[in-house]
Image (spheres, rainbow, N blue to C red):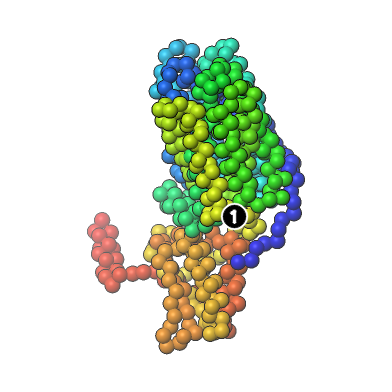
Amino acid sequence: MTDAPAPPRVRAFAPFRHGIFRSVWLASLASNLGSLIQGVGAAWLMTSITQSADLVALVQASSALPIMLFSLLSGAIADNFDRRAVMLVAHGFMLVVSVALTVFAYAGGMTPWLLLGFTFLVGCGSALNNPSWQAAVGDMVPRDHVPAAVALNSVSFNLTRSVGPAIGGAIVAAFGAAAAFAANAVSYLALLVVLARWRPAIQPSTLPREPMALAISAGLRYVAMSPSIARVLIRGFVFGLSAISVLALLPLVARDLVDGGPLLYGVLLGAYGLGALGGALLGARLRGVISNEWIVRIGFLSFALSATVAALGTTAWVTFIGLMIGGASWVLTLSLFNVTVQLATPRWVVGRAMSIYQMATFGGMALGSWIWGLVAEAHGPQAALLVSAAPMLFGALLGAWIRLPEPMTLNLDPLNSFREPHLKLDVTPRSGPIAILIEYLIREEDLHEFLDAMAERRRIRRRDGARQWALMRDLENPQLWIETYHTPTWIEYVRHNQRRTHADATITEQLHRLHSGSEPPRVHRMIERPPDWAASQGQLKGMVDLH
C-alpha cells in the first residue's frame, strides 16, 4: 500500500483559527476545573469518612469503571447519532448528578458506598461523552489539524490540573466537600451553552442508521482487523493498569506519607497537573525528534520513577517533584495513544475505535485502582507504589515485541466512488444474503504480486464487513481467479462499499493493473435463494390474498 504524501507541519495553535474549536476549548477550561475540584472533594471526603485504603482507591476505580463498561455502546452512539446532541445529553446528566451529590453532602448523609455510587454515575456521563467528544475533534478542525487539536485539548485539561486541585483543596479545607461538588455543577453551564449554539456541518448519510448491535460488531471487527490499533490497545491497558497507582493512592500519600491535609493533597495534584502541562507542550516537539515508540518507553520509565519517588519521598517537596515527572509522563503517553488511534481510523468508525481504546485504557485503570488499593490495604501505600513500578518497567520492555506504530499519512477520507448498480430484480434494503464474485485474469509472472495484494484485500474486505471471503482459481483456466464474499443484506453491501477510503483504493488500482483482460474485472452481484424459494413465495402470496 502506498502512503499519501506527508502533510505539511501544522503549527501548535493552528486549531484556534476555527471558531467552534476555540469556543469549546475555552468553555472546557471551566468544565475541567470543576471536574478536578469535584475529584479532590470526593477523594478527600472518602479519607475523612473511612480508614479503608481499599475504599479510597476505589474512588478512582468508580470513575474509570463506567468508561470500561459502556464506552463501546457510547462509541456506536457517537458514530450513529448527532455527536453534539450526545455531548449535550451527557453533560446535562453529569450536571444533574453533581447537583444531587451536592445536596447529599450538604445534608450530611454521605456514606462511602453512596459516594462511590455518585462517582460511578458521573463516570457514566463521562463514558457517554468521551467517544463523541474525541470524535468531534475531527468535526471542528480539518484532519491535518487533529494532532494539534488533541494536544491543545490536553493543554486545556492540564492548565486547570496545575491549579484546579490546589483550588479544590482550599475549597474543601475552608468550606467542605459539598462546596467542591457545587462548584463542579456550575462548571458545566458554559460548555452546555457553547454546545447548544454549535451547528456542525455534517454530511448527511444516504443510508439508514445502523442497528446498535451491528454498529458495535462493526467497530469491534474494524479494530480487530487493524493491527496498528491493536498495539495501542495492549500498551494502553498496561499503562492504565500500572500508572493509575499514583493517582489512586495519592490521598493516602498526602495523609500518611507526608502528613498533610486536603490543601496539601490539592497542591500535590497540582504538581501532577503542572508536569502534565509541561508534557503537553513538549509532546509536539518530541514527536518531531524521536519515534512514537521511544516516547512511550520514556513515559513508562518516567512513571516508574515517579511512583518510586512518591513512595520513598520524605518531604512534600520531593513528592512534588516526583509527581511533576508522573504528570508529564501521563500526558505524553496517553495523548500519543489518542492521536495514533484517531489518525489510524476513518470518520465512519472513529467514535467506536476511540471507545474501544478507552475501554482498554480505563479498564486497566479500574483494575489497577482496585489492585493497588488491596496491596495498600495489606502492606501500606508505600509498598503498593513500589510494587506498581514493576509493570511500568514491563510496559517499556513490551515495546520490543509490540511496537507502537509511527504517525500515519494514509488518506482515510471516504472515496465516495461507489454507485449503486441498476438492478433488474426488485430488492429491498433487507434483501439477502448477497454474494459477490469478481473475476480476474492474472498472468503467471504477476501471480506473487497478485496474491500479496489479495492478502491485503482480504483484510480490508473483512474489516469493512464482508463475510465468507475466499479466493478461488479455475482448474481449467489457471489464469482465471475469482474473489468472492458475502454480506447479509443489500444495504450491508452498499454500506461495505461506502466505507472504502482513498488509502484502500490503492489496492483496487493495483489489482486492476495486474488484471490482463481487455475489460475491467467482471463483477457478479447475486442474491442467494434456496431451491424451495418460489414455493415459499407462492404460499406467502396466498396468505396475503386470503386476508
Q: Describe residue 117's horizontal placement relative to residue 382 as left or right.
A: left
Give the residue at x 46% y 60%: 465
Viewer-closest of 336 and 117: 336
The location of residue 341, given as percent across then percent down, is 57, 50
> Where is the N terminus found, in terms of image quarters?
bottom right
Q: Does residue 502 show up?
A: yes
Residue at x 64% of width, y 66% of height: 2
Q: Is residue 61 left or right of residue 404?
A: left
Q: Residue 83: image x %, image y %?
A: 55, 41
Q: Which residue is mark 1?
A: 405
What percent of the width, then of the height, locates residue 499? 54, 59
State the SS at label 1. loop
| Front residue of 517 and 50 | 50
Q: Can the viewer see residue 75?
A: no
- Residue at the location (61% across, 39% down)? 302
Q: Is residue 376 above or below residue 285?
A: above
Crowding around mark 1 (Cα neighbors within 10 Å: few <14, some 14 to 19, many 20+) is: some
Q: Is residue 458 above or below residue 67?
A: below
Image quarter (top left, top right, bottom left or bottom right) of the C terminus: bottom left
Task: Give, as a three-letter code, the residue at label 1.
Answer: Pro
Q: Residue at x 56, y 61 (%)?
A: 500
How many numbered circles does the render carry?
A: 1
Spot occupied by residue 195 in the image (x, y as percentages of width and height): 61, 34
- Name the foreground residue: 446 vs 87: 446
